[in-house]
Image: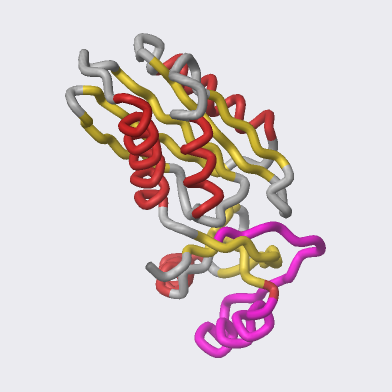
């Protein structure tokens, strides 16, 4: 996924709220689930499912009191069907007074999960280099605007004698990126490609 997101669905007066988040391990998934449960403490159900790992090796789901197989498993199937990993989805339900039946529950929980994931958007994860750009302060605004146009992720900025902008750049384009930057800003700016790499989430075209 590209980001965390929420979406809401009303089905026969029952309110379903889908929440999805990017996580990297079960501890992060459980922390997100606990946060949702705490926020929606008065909900009838907080159903969840998650899939984690480069080979989707960790899969968990729960119906949280709904009839077996009508809630958590359908949410997990939506995650799997969207080919997502490192993803947790919680669907909160406020019962509206009308029973939906087994099929209705499956459809409602699946739709709420799908709506949340659609709101989040999809992304691919790629290895990225950490690049530090050192520049005079009068260039900072121009460089920031350039990075924004090029959709380069700024991690943070340090303000000392010069401005130091730390950004994440896909490894397969980092050399071209640095070369273009020096062509555009030949004076008052230098760069350093730091040791080590990080993971970068790159939104996919819709």
Side (left or right) of 93 relative to 197: left
Q: Which residues are magenta?
A: 172-201
- Residue at point 42%, 66% (across, down): 141
> For residue 19, what is the image quadrant?
top left
Residue 68 visible in the snapshot: yes
- Residue at point 31%, 32% (across, down): 104
Q: Nearer the viewer, residue 115 or 126?
A: 115
Q: Is residue 98 above or below residue 85?
A: above
Number of numbered discs on residues: 0
Residue 156 visible in the snapshot: no
Q: Position of residue 133 (x, y in %)?
A: 62, 68
> For residue 196, what is the image quadrant?
bottom right
Q: Which residue extends farthest right?
A: 195
Q: Is residue 50 above or below residue 54?
A: above
Q: Is residue 174 above or below residue 206?
A: below
Q: Quadrant of the C terminus?
A: bottom left
Is residue 6 located in the magenta-colored stretch of the structure?
no
Q: Nearer the viewer, residue 166 or 89?
A: 89
Q: Position of residue 202 (x, y in %)?
A: 53, 64
């Amino acid at each position: 996924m590209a980001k965390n997101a929420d979406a809401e669905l009303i089905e026969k007066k029952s309110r379903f709220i889908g929440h999805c988040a990017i996580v990297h391990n079960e501890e992060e998934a459980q922390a997100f689930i606990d946060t949702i449960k705490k926020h929606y403490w008065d909900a009838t159900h907080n159903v969840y499912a998650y899939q984690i790992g480069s080979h989707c090796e960790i899969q968990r789901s729960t119906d949280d009191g709904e009839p077996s197989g009508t809630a958590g498993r359908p949410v997990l199937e939506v995650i799997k069907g969207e080919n997502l990993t490192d993803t947790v989805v919680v669907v909160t339900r406020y019962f509206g007074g009308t029973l939906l039946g087994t099929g209705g529950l499956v459809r409602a929980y699946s739709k709420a999960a799908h709506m949340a994931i659609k709101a989040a958007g999809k992304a691919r994860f790629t290895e990225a280099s950490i690049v530090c750009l050192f520049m005079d302060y009068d260039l900072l605004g121009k460089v920031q605007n350039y990075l924004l146009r090029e959709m380069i992720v700024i991690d943070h900025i340090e303000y000392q004698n010069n401005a130091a902008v730390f950004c994440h750049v896909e490894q397969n384009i980092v050399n071209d990126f640095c070369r273009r930057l020096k062509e555009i800003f030949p004076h008052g700016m230098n760069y350093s490609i730091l040791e080590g790499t990080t993971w970068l989430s790159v939104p996919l075209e819709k």
